[in-house]
Image (cartoon, helix red, strand yellow):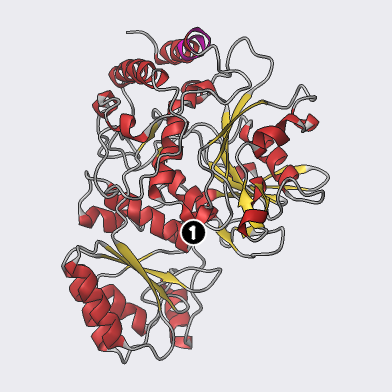
Amino acid sequence: MIPRATIQLLLSCLCCARLYAFSPSLSRTNQFPVGNNRSCRHRSKSCDSVRRHTSVDHDEASDNTIDTDINAADSIHSATLASASHTDLTRLDELPIHNSVASDAGPLWKEELCDDPALCTVIPHRGRPRKRVLVLCTGGTLTMQNDAMKGNSLAPVQGALTKYLAGMSELTSDPEMPEIISHEYTPLIDSSDMGPGDWAMLARDIYTNYYYFDGFVILMGTDTMAYAASALTFMLQNLGKPVIFTGSQIPLREPYNDARKNLIMATIFASSDTMSEVAIFFHDRLVRGCRATKVNTSKLKAFDSPNLPPLAEIGINIIENDHLFRPPPRGSFKINTAMDTRMITLRLVPGFDDASIKAMIDAARQTHLKGLILQLYGTGNLPSLKDGLIDCLASAAKAGVVVVATTQCVTGSVIMGHYATGQKLLGAGVVSASDMTIEATTTKLAYLLGRQDLTISEVRDLMTVDLRGEMTPEKELPPPPLASTYQKVIAKKNRSRIY
């Protein structure tokens, strides 16, 4: 049996050799193997040959699995290179996203963390003095300018990014900066128009070009960037390279803008040797993609990470909190892009009509509702006198709807059972989102519901498990405030937290 480290090295060298043998135009141009969604659906089923792990915390990939992965990678790259001419951002919002996609690889639901650094090191491309970063541009403020035909409002301009990149000497004159290869999707779209189909397209294009580049930058609008970053965090399984989202509040064409710095810093972080996750860089900080949320519409500091410190901050120096970085993966890189979006999000306000909410939930169940996300008060509370709503939630949970409780607070977490009203929710079958953002909660639920290998019971259980660093494990959450002296005495006696 050939040692696994040798196989990993041969696979990396093979992918690098194919880059030059089959894709000579992959230089500083827009021509590279961009996957086509519809062709990807039938591209390869060989990825499904990767065996299922029933216990990701203790299972290890076997030599036979690695041999299978090499054969799968061989067929995948041959197929995707043939579709290099497809460069449009195919719209998939009209397709049944909740259906399983045949090309999605592997049934694993959680990454296997690296326990053998020799197998987890991503080998840089041989024969090149500089790293290579792929910049995927979907649109956004960064590429916009005033359009006289649209009332002088801002609109994305096709080809703007390529033009501006050519004039940014910071990216070309410094030999330590990575080589940038950019691709603009056609047409450029506003981020408010992006959805699961577009996120799947980005995931597939990263998958297609994974072994050709050292990192990836995704340029898009800020309105739904946190949703897209959260979605790709779950779609890209066993990710071993950085994927950095960025954009701007001011177009790149303006004399004073934030786009230039954001683009440069995103490129730097995308060429990092120590990052293996999806993140957002904006203004002066790098935050985990599934921990980010947009907090401001007009200031340059548009994004924050309420419940996790930044992965890195920039000032005179770049300060990396590398202890927060995700460990490198142990398993092979896979994508799972199927998302079931048959869900609704409900934000409670004082004085709400529980009869109307009950009628809405009942009507949604008739159209095969799969998920219900509740944005509740404080640590996960709702009015205790409105038993009709709790009965409705219990009925929905029994019918197979995954009901998830989040908090309306910016920071902090849901601690169900701390108050009597929260205890009722537990009895109704509602699960806690802990300290996840609403962006992470919705995309995680859609991702898990889209997994055809999971039962509803397993989806409920996994919503409370930290899969990609999107939530703080329950044992690491700060204890809730003790409501009475009696609880303090009991807590001291039992030396345990009271929830």
- Give percent across and percent down for residue 425: 30, 76
Q: Is residue 193 above or below residue 138?
A: below
Q: Is residue 440 above or below residue 114?
A: below
From the image, tell me which residue sits under label 1: 476
Please give the name of the residue rendered at 80% of the width and 48% of the height, measured from the top-left corner: 315
Instruction: Report which quarter residue 491 is drawn in.
Output: bottom left
Which of these two is toward me, 144 or 22?
144
Side of 286 relative to 177 (left or right): left
User: Is residue 436 something that shows in the picture?
Assistant: no
- Give percent across and percent down for residue 377: 45, 79
Side of 416 relative to 120 (left or right): left
Which of these two is toward me, 147 or 226?
147
Please give the name of the residue rendered at 38% of the width and 83% of the height, measured from the top-left corner: 382
Please give the name of the residue rendered at 45% of the width and 44% of the height, measured from the top-left corner: 232
Mark 1 crowdedness (10 Å alpha carbons): few <14, some 14-19, many ≥20 = few
State which quarter of the image contains the C terminus: bottom left
Q: Is residue 17 magenta?
A: yes
- Give percent across and percent down for residue 14: 46, 10
Please give the name of the residue rendered at 77% of the width and 32% of the height, measured from the top-left corner: 167
Which of these two is toward me, 355 or 35?
35
Q: What secondary structure is the magenta-colored segment mainly?
A: helix
**Residue type, numbered disc 1:** Glu
Instruction: Report which quarter residue 68 is drawn in.
Output: top left
- Give percent across and percent down for residue 472: 48, 57
Q: What range of the chain is rendered magenta? A: 14-21
Instruction: Report which quarter residue 105 is drawn in.
Output: top left
User: Is residue 57 something that shows in the picture?
Assistant: yes
Count every numbered label the image shows and give the total: 1
